[in-house]
Amino acid sequence: MNEMRPIMAKVGIIPNADGSAMFSFGKTVAIAAVYGPRQLHPQHMQDPATGILRVNYDLLSFSVSDRKRPGPSRRSNEISKMIEWALIPVLNLKDFPNTVIDVQIYIPQADASTRVAGINAASMALAHAGIPMKDLVCSVSVGKLDKELVVDVDKEEEDFKEGEGATDFPLAKVAHGDEFTLLQLDGKIQPELISKALAMASDACDEIYEVQKKALKGSVGE
Amino acid sequence: MNSINEAHEAVEEEFSEPSKRSVVVPGEIVVSGEDYLPGEGVRREGENVVASRFGLAEQLGRVVKVIPLTGAYVPRRNNVVIGRITDVLHNGWLSDIDCPGNGFLPIAESPRFINQYEMDQFLAIGDIISAKIWSIKGRGIDLTIKGKGLGKLEGGFIFRVSPSRVPRIIGREGSMIGLIKDNTGCSITLGQNGWVWINGPDTEAMIRARKAVQYIADNVHIGGLTDHMDDWFKKN
């Protein structure tokens, strides 16, 4: 139950972007492209004190079995904002006043845990774009099937109905140290299980970090 | 056209005998110990020197720094850049230099006197200039075209390479770019923002020079690239 689906990561997949990356958990695939820092328009959004981060997350229409209606939705807006908050703690946007860093995250293939795959891809793409960062962000979802904790939830586990039902607990963490930048909870979990879930996620994040690091280093000299 | 003189100085120190090089990711410990001084792209955390960005970590004496390998151009003072005039104002020109913010070239920074009402006869919208950044204040980048090799670029063509590859294309003390100039007979101006302008005796030589620049940009990680380029010129 501590096992994640096979992880794959690649950097530099979009030549036109300043930085880009792909990250996948088994059948879930996320691609991220970073543009900037660049001039922010509309001008009234510009902040002379700091730069801003603008994330756009979306599922592609063919990524799920029922066609997803293309374009922004309540769900994608919400997840975009939340990914933004998960990434800002490692960035130093004060160095780039009046500018924006655009992060585009798309999911070409979805099998649950798309937001955490998106965060992993975005974190690598930001590093690839040469943006000063405190650390990489690693992200994983912990699930609870009836009474059992599992790491890296897939669609089948997400739809689990028996017993207490399924819980989805996506979280993101700064690679070194114990700082969590995202905690969401969809479902029910006993308070005493949370510390166990965090410990499981930490171990999984260490594994993800190694993959991210390897992909970034491997992109040099291609 | 030798507008990259200033750029050479910056490159000289970057490429003089780095003792150790390795690729690092943000948050990775580059070296531990109190003896080291954090340079660009790194920071000190307790007794460790930690990378702040993705790139090549280099140790020069006691100074440790990270040279970025990818990313957008961030303007610095004294950089020579190539830009395109986007607007003619009453007191100067606005120029797109491919970075956040426009470059402003005041009328007083042109090498000769220009009548305020005939500014577009000197530089019109769409003209390409090579200019030097002489100050960066809050918002706005001020340019100058007073200096050797700076000014309007006529003839030839421009194209873009990744800005982080520019120091390598120039090479140590301009060795690499000198090699291309000698082999193709073209004059090349490299902007730190990644725009390259090539002008030469004939189109074929210019295309050959462009291919050479592109080849270096795609193969920056190869050691001893200058020697390698000698072979490349024999083949192409």
Image: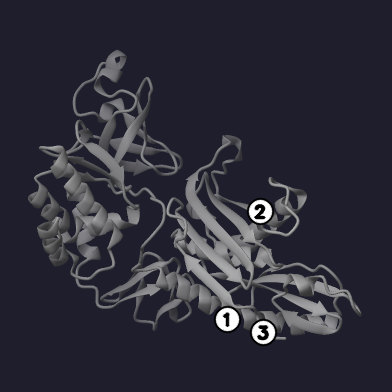
> Does dot 1 land on a helix, a strand or a loop?
helix
**Quadrant assignment for the N terminus of chain B:** top left
| Residue drawn at 60 percent across, 60 percent down | A88
Among numbered discs 3 and 1, the one appearing first in the sequence: 3
Residue linked to disc 2: A58
B179 vs A138: above or below: above
- Tag 3 subunit: A
Residue A110: x %, y % from top left? 68, 63
Q: Nearer the viewer, residue B32 or B178?
A: B178
Residue A105 picture quarter: bottom right
Position of B122 with respect to A78 (left or right) is: left
> Does dot 3 land on a helix, a strand or a loop?
loop
Residue A161: x %, y % from top left? 88, 74
Mark 3 or 1, which is nearer the eye?
Answer: 3
Residue B169: x %, y % from top left? 23, 56
**Quadrant assignment for the C terminus of chain B:** bottom left
Measure how far apart labels 2 and 3 are at the Cα level: 27 Å
Position of A73 with respect to A130 (left or right) is: right
Measure how far apart labels 3 and 1 are at the Cα level: 11 Å
Among numbered discs 1 and 2, the one appearing first in the sequence: 2
B36 vs B205: above or below: below
The label shown at residue A127 is none
- Tag 1 subunit: A
- Judge if badges 1 and 2 mark residues of a common chain: yes
Position of B96 with respect to B131 (left or right) is: right
